[in-house]
């Protein structure tokens, strides 16, 4: 599993990225629907590079533990957002989000009011 990073630091040329809604898979390889969640990591983009690297390592640690459930991950540093798509299993989204929050306490789950 590769953690896709987007940052404001660019290479030689600027290219618009494909919108997330076009890149996020909606079904797994077997055709089953996926579930997803988004986490806000306030002020991530303004942190020093060594802090960002540490946070990315913590995220990778959690996602590695749950790798059998993870289908897609996108960390947009510029927008301070982490998007995770998982296999649609009862409770797995909340479990992964809670594990991420445990290692990255500033990460907050973005959810609708229920």
Image (cartoon, rainbow, N blue to C red):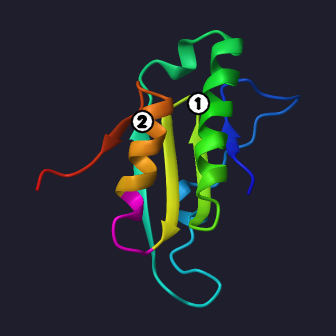
Q: Which stretch is magenta?
A: 88-93
Q: Which residue is mark 2?
A: 101
Distance from disc 1 to disc 2, alpha carbons, whole Å, reads: 17 Å
Q: Is residue 29 left or right of residue 96?
A: right
Q: Is residue 103 left or right of residue 109?
A: right
Q: Residues within 10 Å of mark 1 (few under 14, many from 20)?
A: many
Q: Nearer the viewer, residue 13 or 32?
A: 32
Q: Is residue 1 magenta?
A: no
Quadrant of the image occupied by residue 31: bottom right
Q: Earlier in the sequence, mark 1 or mark 2?
A: 1
Relative to residue 113, is residue 107 depicted above or below? above
Whole-percent x, y for residue 44 in the image? 52, 21
What element does badge 2 sit on? helix
Quadrant of the image occupied by residue 95: bottom left
Q: For the point 59% across and 63% down, which residue is it?
A: 70
Q: Is residue 80 visible?
A: no
Q: For the point 43% across and 34% down, which residue is it?
A: 102
Q: For the point 70% across and 14% down, which residue is it?
A: 49
Residue 114: mark: none
Pick out the residue farthest to the bottom: 30
Residue 77: mark: 1
Q: Nearer the viewer, residue 33 or 7?
A: 33
Relative to residue 31, is residue 38 depicted above or below? above
Q: Residues within 10 Å of mark 2 (few under 14, many from 20)?
A: some
What element does badge 1 sit on? loop
Q: For the point 46% across and 43% down, which residue is it?
A: 99
- The quarter of the picture where the N terminus appears is bottom right
Quadrant of the image occupied by residue 77: top right
């Amino acid at each position: 599993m590769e953690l896709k990073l987007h940052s404001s630091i660019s290479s030689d040329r600027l290219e618009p990225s494909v919108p997330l809604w076009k890149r996020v898979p909606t079904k797994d390889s077997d055709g089953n629907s996926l579930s997803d969640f988004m986490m806000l990591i306030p002020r991530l983009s303004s942190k020093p590079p060594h802090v960002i690297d540490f946070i990315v390592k913590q995220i990778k640690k959690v996602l590695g533990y749950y790798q059998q459930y993870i289908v897609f991950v996108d960390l947009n540093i510029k927008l301070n957002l982490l998007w995770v798509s998982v296999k649609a299993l009862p409770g797995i989204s909340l479990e992964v989000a809670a594990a991420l929050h445990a290692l990255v306490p500033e990460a907050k789950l973005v959810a609708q009011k229920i």
